[in-house]
Each structure stands twice: as C-alpha cells, then as structure tokens.
Amino acid sequence: MDDFFTVPINMSSPSHPVPLDRLKTPLVVFQPKLPVADRLLPYLRLIDANRWYSNRGPLLARFEQALADHFAVASDRVIGVANATAGLTASLLAAGVDDAGRDGSPLCILPSWTHEATAVAALRAGLTPWFHEVEEADWSLSPERVADSLRANPTLAARVSHVIVTAPFGAVVAAEPWRALSDHFGLAVTIDAASGFDQLRGGPVDAVVSLHATKVLGVGEGGVVIAQDAQRAARLRDLVQLGLSDERVIQRAGLNAKLSEYGAAIGLAALDIWPERRATLVRLRAHYAARLGGVPGLSLWAPEGVSSTLMLRLPGPVAVETGRRLAARGIATRRWWHAGCHRQPAFAACPRHPLPITEALADSVLGLPFHEDLTLCDIDTVVDTLRDVLAD
C-alpha cells in the first residue's frame, strides 16, 4: 500500500524511511500542532471550578457559540461531537428519511474519492455505499450527474435514501443545488466538509467538519455538525447521547459521541490563536503557489482559504513513483486518500459506477509537506527537488 512516503512519525500508516544522510533534517509531510499548555490552563481551571467534565457542559456551550459565530449560523444549529465520523453517522441517522417503503437495504450515494471514514459512517448508519464518480474540475460529486444516475438506474434509485457530498481538501461545496436535489427526490443530503473549517458557512443541508489533530483547527479528536435547521439539530443532540431526549426517552437508538469539556477547552484555546495560525498557513501556501507555478505540468489544488494539506496533481499516473523518489531525497509526501474507497476490501461488494476520474486522481495526486514548522526555504527545497525528480 504505497500511500505514505516519509520518515516514521506519530501517525499510523505504511512508511518508506528516508535515508537521514540525504537531508540534515528530513521534511515531514505533516506536523500536528495543538494549543500549548499555557494557552489551555485558563480553560482547565474553569473545568476544575465547574466540576463538569462531559454531558453538554458550559465550556461546550461556549465553544459551540464561538463556532456558530465562525460558521455564521445560530448557535442552536451547532453540535460538538467526539469525532467527525460519529458526527457524519449521526447526521445520517437524524435525517429521518422513511426507508420502510424502499426496495431492499437502503443505499447512500457518495464518492469513492474521499476518506474511508465517509464510507464507514454510511455503513455504521445502516446504509450501503453506492459509489459515484466525481467531476474532473472540482474533485466532487455533481448534483446534475447524481440526478441523472437516479433517473437512469430506477432499481437502485428506489433504494437510495441519503447522499454524502465530500468537499475535497477544504474546498467549498455549494449547498443550494444539493438542497434542491434533496427536495426533488426526497433524499437526505449531508456535506462531509472534514477539512472545511476555514471556508464553510452554514447552509440548507447538514455539514460535518473534523476537529482532528490533523486539521487546521483541532482538539485532538473531535468534530462539529452544522445542522440544516434547529429541528434537525435537536435530533442530533439526542442521537449523540445514545438517542436520549431531555425526558430520557429514546425514539431512535443513537451513539455515544459527545464532545467533553476537555475537548471544548482545547477548541476554545485553538480559536484564540486561529487568526495567527491562519495567517501563517496563508503565507506558506502562497509561497508554494508562486514556486510551483513555474513547474510545467503541475496543478496545485488551491481552493479559497486554507486547509491542513497541500495537494498537487502530477502530470500522469506517477504519484507512487514520485513519492518514493522524493522520500529517497529526504522529503515526505502522502497520498491522503490512497486509491479510492472502492478499492478497499471492506467496500468491495458495494455497487459503483465506472470510476475512471477517481482512479486517475488516485494515481496522480500527491500531498506535499505542509505545516506551520516549514520555512520558506524548506518550501524552496521541496519545489526544487520535485522539479529535479520530474525532470529525470
């Protein structure tokens, strides 16, 4: 599984160790950075004073309000969760689509070009993934193509109850066309915006953002659901505490996916330093863009705003070989979404459309080093080495 070309670091993934004599300090592809202890201390003291550690405490309420301000929605639409995968599962469960009249087990349309967690969330919600192709231009599903698929495949379409739209690597997905599709076909739509913290704003369908340590605003493990409306949010709050309502009645079994006060404390501290961190990432991305612009055949994935990855499309199916050769010169890279979900054994039996674009992206997209510890000189080294590797 050639997806991670790097020195071993504190992430679980197959690796290709870099010869340490090639660079004095090998350049890792990613370096997590959460708020330091001094930033956390005021919030930890509040937890000590409150003696409220989980179960929707005051720091979580404060964090959700701050997130609501960031996402430009009312605070009653924001739900902090233990992780984004659980949040995605809860969103699917909360949609309330009636599957009783559907022929066979319910299906969820989603892209194969996404993190495996997207498909896992669908399975955990009792849905079978139906993998659809993404668009070449924006690496995401098209509502028009999904609508065409539903009309052209009536047998499978009769089983579809949900759609998950992945916003790739921090990109923005227009929610309104998906709401129109939802209304027309009677399907629930959720946007998996795991890397979308910077640019996402609340819209007319549910969206889920990851707060994992690998994201631009992280709490270690965590996530947030921005519900499409207050009614959906109320169901979500019940579902992430096993399905229990305020009256301790379970109408539908949920999951234990609450965000603790400690997670909220880290989130609040991270928000305190977010403007500074964002400015650093913007500066680094701009330098990459300027340097890569002079390398023929390369296409930098550069959505508005910032995310925690820097994705590059190479000229042809050379991601694996390029990653190996950069690793041999002391530069780590990663194929963040590997080969597409449809190639994973757990999803081998799931229905799918032909996926030539997904497979081409899997073979040509590579993540370059991108984190706050990089210097502009480091970026120059990455780009110059990449230029040499591609020229050989």
Image: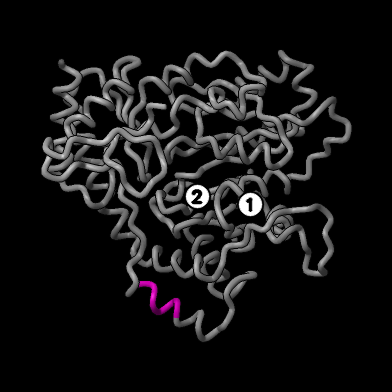
x and y percent of residue 46 in the render? 48, 81
- Kindly identify the amino acid type of the residue bearing the numbered disc 1: Ala
Query: On the image, numbered disc 2 is attached to which residue?
Result: 210
Query: Relative to the observer, which residue lies in front, 321 or 303?
Result: 321
**Residue 286 shows up from this direction:** yes
Identity of the residue furthest to the bottom in this view: 49
Would you say residue 284 sits in the magenta stretch? Answer: no
The residue located at (32%, 46%) in the rendering is 9
Magenta region: 39-44
- Kindly identify the amino acid type of the residue bearing the numbered disc 2: Ser
x and y percent of residue 18 in the render? 22, 35
First along the sequence among labels 1 and 2 = 2
The residue located at (57%, 75%) in the rendering is 53
Q: Quadrant of residue 345?
A: top right
Identity of the residue furthest to the right in this view: 101
Q: Quadrant of residue 142?
A: top right
Q: Is residue 181 above or below residue 30?
A: above
Q: Is residue 142 above or below residue 44?
A: above
The mark found on residue 227 in the picture is 1
Using the numbered discs, state the Cα–Cα distance from disc 1 to disc 2 in whole angstroms. Answer: 14 Å
By secondary structure, the bulk of the magenta-drawn segment is best described as helix
x and y percent of residue 183 in the render? 73, 35
Determine whether the residue tagged by mark 2 lies in a helix, strand or loop.
Answer: strand
